[in-house]
Amino acid sequence: MPIRIDKLEELAAQDGPLHLALGVFDGVHVGHRAVIARAVEAARKEGGKAFVVTFDPHPIRVIAPEKAPASLLATLDEKAAVLKALGVDGLLVIHFDMAFAKMDAEEFVRKLLAADVRTVAVGEDWRFGSKRSGDVAMLRRMGGELGFQLEAVPPVMWDGERISSTRIRQAIRDGNFDAVEEMLGRPYELSGTVIEGRKLGRGLGFPTANLRLGERQTPRDGVWAVKVDGVRKGVANLGTRPTVDGGERLLEVHLLDFSGDLYGKELRVRFEKFLRPERKFGSLEELREQIGRDAEEARQFPA
């Protein structure tokens, strides 16, 4: 994983020179990758390290919670894994609260530039600092003063519109995973640690690995054909399991042709095909028979 730090002051302690990509980068989609690539390319060309500077929680959840997305596209750990694959050397995760939101934009830049920063890459419409007063024009002016190269990257378009996390979240809700993959630049997966459940699936002959969903964006509730860890076929129920009075919303995954203990293991689940809505059955036997049909349909889905 990339080096991970959580204080602005720690950036200056890193061996320089540094090449920074700044942004929230929820999901690290294709548009974000274009910004990050500028920092990575500069580091490879000029020497030094490529760092991504991001914020947690999502700034809009602090500044305007009523406008904030209910769900995110990636946890910090998932984001770090994607950044590693992109060639990023380090990740600065700044805790975003109201005190930080009130920081003057120029003060923020000067704190960043306490480190040996040679490149700053941002989206060309990125705004930052108190009252969103910081922008590309300010960064360009400060680059001339402080000696860093500004890389202002235009939006990346797909299907006639700019790629955004909002579009991707909607495509996930719609179950349009081909569009999601195009805009993300990779398949969308939910990851989590397998928790111990009530073992009802095992009693029905279909043991499941249960994952809590946290704040992750999910598609519609129901039964899905899935791929686990990129290789294993499975069938999954996303929802509250009304036949057994489940209550808590979980993702329950039955791996086809697998036996073994998965408790405590980290799984990555990719949604492949929606099979049917979740519904309440008249008996456990009806549920067992339907799960068998679901599993067979999932088995027929191309690898």
Image (cartoon, rainbow, N blue to C red):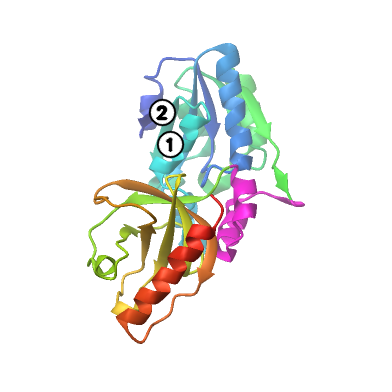
Tell me which secondary structure the magenta stretch mostly adopts: helix
The amino acid on which the numbered mark 1 sits, given as a three-letter code, is Ala
Q: Mark 2 vs mark 1: which is more N-terminal?
A: 2
Numbered badge on residue 80: 1
Is label 2 in contact with label 1 (beta carbons under 8 Å)? Answer: yes
Q: Position of residue 205 (x, y in %)?
A: 29, 66
Report the number of numbered marks. 2
Give the residue drawn at x 26%, y 56%.
195
Camera-side residue: 53 or 109? 53
Q: Is residue 284 left or right of residue 107?
A: left
Queried whether the magenta region covers residue 179, the answer comes back as yes
Give the residue drawn at x 24%, y 48%.
264
Secondary structure beneath dot 1 equals: helix
Camera-side residue: 270 or 86? 270
Q: In the image, is residue 190 above or below residue 95?
A: below
The quadrant of the picture occupied by the N terminus is top left
Q: Is residue 172 visible?
A: yes
Q: Which residues are magenta?
A: 159-185
Secondary structure beneath dot 2 equals: loop
The amino acid on which the numbered mark 2 sits, given as a three-letter code, is Pro
Q: Which residue is mark 2?
A: 2
Q: Quadrant of residue 273?
A: bottom right
Q: Quadrant of residue 15?
A: top left
Q: Position of residue 206 (x, y in %)?
A: 32, 64
